[in-house]
Image: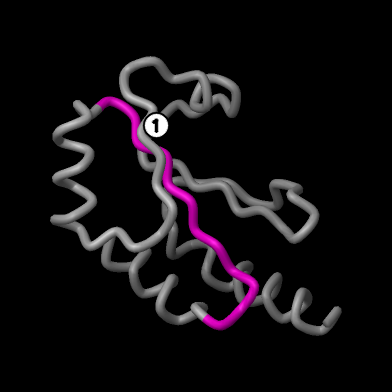
Amino acid sequence: MPHLRELVKLHQDRPFALIGVNTGDSPEDYRKGLETHGVSWISAYQGEDTPIADMYRVRGYPTYFLLDTDGKIVMTGHSGSAMDDKIEELLAKAEAKK
């Protein structure tokens, strides 16, 4: 989670949003985790029933999806830091459009 907090802080004034979806934890553990890990971004609780994970064919955790400004998935993976260069590229492209 430290890298995710770093991304949110680094890009706070840019067209960037981080959205988390939690599966598997109990509602209580989910809420505690938000506080423990300092989650400041949008986070949703999905629980044991995993329609979102099923829809996007998530097979391992964590799984990251990087979307462009059109909502198109441009990259997926299990390492958030592996997406850093692509995030920067997409942000620069979005800011150039303004």
Residue 18 painted magenta: yes
Q: In this picture, which residue range is highlighted in magenta?
A: 13-24
Quadrant in which the N terminus is drawn: bottom left
Q: Is residue 96 above or below residue 61?
A: below
Q: Position of residue 9 (x, y in %)?
A: 40, 78
Q: Is residue 56 above or below residue 95?
A: above
Quadrant in which the C terminus is drawn: bottom right
Q: Residue at x 15, y 36 (%)?
A: 29
Residue at the right extreme of this rendering: 97
**Number of marks:** 1
Q: Position of residue 21 (x, y in %)?
A: 42, 39
Q: Position of residue 31 (x, y in %)?
A: 20, 42
Q: Residue at x 75, y 81 (%)?
A: 95
Q: Residue at x 70, y 47 (%)?
A: 73
Q: How is the image coloured?
A: one colour
What element does badge 1 sit on?
A: loop
Q: Which residue is mark 1?
A: 60
Question: How many residues crowd around disc 1 within 10 Å: few (fewer than 14), some, or many (20 or more)?
Answer: few
Q: Quadrant of residue 7?
A: bottom left
98 or 93: nearer the viewer: 98
Three-letter amino acid code of the residue under disc 1:
Gly
Q: Quadrant of residue 66?
A: bottom right
Q: Residue at x 22, y 38 (%)?
A: 30
Residue 53 painted magenta: no
60 or 37: nearer the viewer: 37
Q: Position of residue 59 (x, y in %)?
A: 45, 26
- 15 relative to 57 in the view: left or right: right
- 70 relative to 75 in the view: left or right: right
